[in-house]
Image: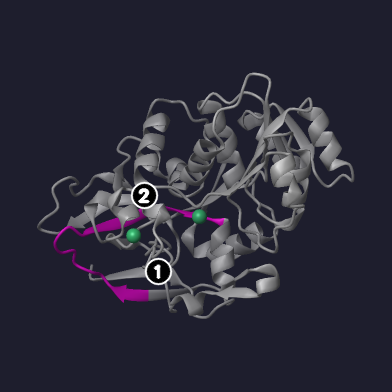
């Protein structure tokens, strides 16, 4: 075979198109992966639109950041090693691997410190480089591959994005005392994994928050202690009541004005608000609360490669409850995007390629 197939974005906002490419031959430390599973992430919706909502600052257009079309998106990628460059020593053909997609520039101090996700010039696979909505994906260095031999690729592939994103956020949130509570806002792919990983990290008192009762039921199954439908008018006081007036942490996987409104009001004194969602708009709160409520407001962006390896070790040890996976063929990518945008997905859509 000398050709491979992908579903590419050719124009911003338009459906993905099936395209054919010449199959690359890996050289040096490059590795060619035959993709078997590719997860669909909420940020793929933002990517498809071509911009993010910066509130009063307008829009962040990806073209202004150097994005070029056509491009193969998809940053949750797992598969089988099909070919390797001459200098590859740690992976071999036939091995099942998960791709760490959050590549940095490779040169800055953050990158040299294995904190690629803190790099200011990221070169993400499935964003700046061709990604996983394809039969094949070329990875520039074997060091970005994590061994998942013996695991179900479709089940673990979301950990490359949704998993390490919340893993990182939970580390930033820090430990809670026995009597303190945390809320996880948004029970999509990120939120579901946040509950599973929080349980694995020994967080006990977890309130799942969403506007969809079906997702809240799924959150209870994942291990949430209590749930709150935040579409009710008294969501702030109800969240405080459920948390026994000890809401010390919030992980916000939605990241919009409405969820920030609830979080900064419901948190108790010295509370910590960690935002990973990127719904967009303007973040607003009375600034004096930062002092008087001794509040921490903190963003967290994806995660680094040591965190992904630690997370996969936890999966292997059976510590992470599997979130629901909605398996679909890659040829149905446009339908899947529509369902995700409409909120009709429980857990994560993963394409069997
Ligand atoms: Zn993602
Ligand atoms: Zn860097």
Q: Please tell me in which quadrant of the rendered image residue 3 appears.
A: bottom left
Task: Please tell me which residue is depicted at 51% across the width and 27% down the height of the picture.
Answer: 200
Quadrant of the snapshot with the C terminus: bottom left
Please name which of the two marks, 1 or 2, marks the residue nearer to the observer: 2
The residue at which mark 2 appears reads as: 115
**Could you tell me which residue is drawn at 67 percent across and 41 percent down?**
295
Residue 256 versus residue 252 in the image, above or below: below
Q: In which quarter of the image is the N terminus?
A: bottom left
Which residue range is magenta in the image? 20-41
**Where is residue 348 shown, x and y percent of the image?**
56, 48
Q: Distance between the residues labelled 1 and 2?
A: 18 Å
Inspect the magenta stretch and tell me whether residue 26 lies in it: yes
Q: Is mark 1 on a helix, strand or loop?
A: loop
Asked whether, in this view, residue 41 is left or right of residue 237, the answer is left
Horizontal arrangement in the rendering, residue 293 relative to residue 334 (left or right): right
Q: Farthest left residue?
A: 86
Q: Position of residue 193 (x, y in %)?
A: 55, 39
Mark carried by residue 128: 1
**63 in magenta:** no
- Find residue 110 and report its horizontal and vertical position in percent: 34, 53
Is there any visible trace of residue 220 in the rendered image?
A: yes
Residue found at the far top of this picture: 178
């Amino acid at each position: 075979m000398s050709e491979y197939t992908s579903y590419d974005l050719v124009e911003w906002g338009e459906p993905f198109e099936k395209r054919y490419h010449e199959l690359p031959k890996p050289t040096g430390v490059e590795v060619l992966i035959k993709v078997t599973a590719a997860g669909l992430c909420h940020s793929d919706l933002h990517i498809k639109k071509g911009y993010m909502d910066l509130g009063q600052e307008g829009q962040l257009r990806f073209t202004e950041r150097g994005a070029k079309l056509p491009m193969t998106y998809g940053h949750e990628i797992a598969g089988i090693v099909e070919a390797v460059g001459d200098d590859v020593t740690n992976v071999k053909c036939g091995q099942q691997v998960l791709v760490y997609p959050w590549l940095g520039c490779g040169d800055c101090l953050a990158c040299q410190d294995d904190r690629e996700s803190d790099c200011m010039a990221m070169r993400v696979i499935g964003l700046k480089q061709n990604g996983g909505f394809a039969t094949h994906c070329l990875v520039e260095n074997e060091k970005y591959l994590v061994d998942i031999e013996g695991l179900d690729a479709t089940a673990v592939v979301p950990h490359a994005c949704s998993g390490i994103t919340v893993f990182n956020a939970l580390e930033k949130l820090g430990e809670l005392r026995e009597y303190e509570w945390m809320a996880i806002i948004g029970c999509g792919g990120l939120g579901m994994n946040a509950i599973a990983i929080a349980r694995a990290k020994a967080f006990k008192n977890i309130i799942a928050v969403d506007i969809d009762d079906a997702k809240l039921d799924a959150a209870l199954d994942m291990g949430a202690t209590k749930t709150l439908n935040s579409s009710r008018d008294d969501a702030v006081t109800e969240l405080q009541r459920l948390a026994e007036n000890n809401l010390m942490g919030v992980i916000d996987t939605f990241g919009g004005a409405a969820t920030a409104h609830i979080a900064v009001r419901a948190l108790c004194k010295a509370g910590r608000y960690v935002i990973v969602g990127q719904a967009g708009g303007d973040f607003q709160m009375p600034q004096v609360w930062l002092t008087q409520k001794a509040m921490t407001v903190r963003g967290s962006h994806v995660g680094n490669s040591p965190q992904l390896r630690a997370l996969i070790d936890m999966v292997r040890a059976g510590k992470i409850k599997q979130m629901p996976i909605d398996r679909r063929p890659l040829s149905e990518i446009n339908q899947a995007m529509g369902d995700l945008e409409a909120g009709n997905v429980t857990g994560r859509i993963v394409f069997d390629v």
